[in-house]
Amino acid sequence: MPEATLPRTAEVDQSRRAPGGLLARAVPPPDDWQRGLVFPFYGCGEPVVTDGCVTSTDEPHRPTVAAFRPFQIRQGSSCSMLSRVEVTDHALGRLDATTEWALGNQLATGTAGVGAASLADATSLGTFTSIVEGVAALMQAAADAGFGMPIWLHAPYGAIPVLSAFRLVVDDMLGGVAQWVFSPGYPQIGGPDEVRIWATSTVWAAVDVSQEMTNPERRQNTAEAWAQRAGIVAFDTCVNLSADVPTRGCPPESS
């Protein structure tokens, strides 16, 4: 007697990641990042500038070591064994497609609970009535806090239209000096007509190779699969600022 199966249909490839984001923009961390990343307590201070004949002693400005630990990203898939669907491939495809969201959400909220700093800890510059003024204030405050450290600007997808309309994003940069990062995992915080954006210094991010597990339940004719990988996202906490800016306004006319 032939084995009963459901008609085979074409399966959709779900493994595509969102373009841009942290995995495309962030600096790769050292090879042994799986043990965690730390920023030493000695940092955040302004450079000591003196006459060549005067001695001076610099002091540490960061109160503690800033530590970032890796976290797990997991996706699952379940389907009838009669369908002949490769549940492992589906779980891995979903993991690949949503890894960027997981990294962005961890940086923004610290939801993994590994005790690392996040954008939720940012010092707020307040609410601005002009997006240009808000971005300008964020840039200057980041330059002041970092004493010349690289500036990275972060925004949710909801901010892309207004930032583009006001020409504040050109090739994912602002003025050629600040890197924009748009991640689907960044939440849109604020009212219906405003959005929160952030500024940090350099960001490091990476993910490990995936691991897959399968659990067939033959009595129920179902198969379950899981795919998971380790990830890490870290930034120098010397610069961690936010500003709430409007999503409406009249952009400059094209010349």
Image: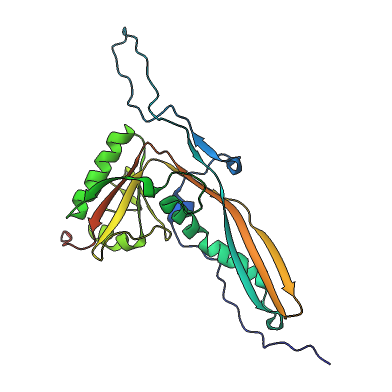
Residue 34 horizontal side relative to residue 42, left or right: right
User: How many numbered circles does the render carry?
Assistant: 0
Residue found at x 47% / y 54%: 111
Q: Position of residue 224 (x, y in %)?
A: 67, 71
- Residue 167 seen in render: no
- Using the image as rendered, state which of residue 22 and residue 73 is in the foreground: 73
Using the image, determine if residue 22 lies above or below residue 222.
above
Residue 240 horizontal side relative to residue 167, left or right: right
- Residue 102 seen in render: yes
Residue found at x 51% / y 36%: 38
Using the image, determine if residue 159 lies above or below residue 119.
below
Residue found at x 59% / y 67%: 93
- Using the image as rendered, state which of residue 138 and residue 148 is in the foreground: 138
Residue 112 horizontal side relative to residue 120, left or right: right
Q: Position of residue 162 (x, y in %)?
A: 25, 61
Give the residue at the far bottom of this rendering. 1
Using the image, determine if residue 130 lies above or below residue 89.
above
User: Considering the image in quadrants, where does the N terminus appear?
Assistant: bottom right
Q: Position of residue 61 (x, y in %)?
A: 37, 27
Using the image, determine if residue 82 lies above or below residue 40.
below
- Using the image as rendered, state which of residue 177 and residue 21 is in the foreground: 21
The quarter holding residue 249 reads: bottom left
Q: Position of residue 197 (x, y in %)?
A: 31, 52
User: Considering the image in quadrants, where does the C terminus appear?
Assistant: bottom left
Residue found at x 34% / y 61%: 188
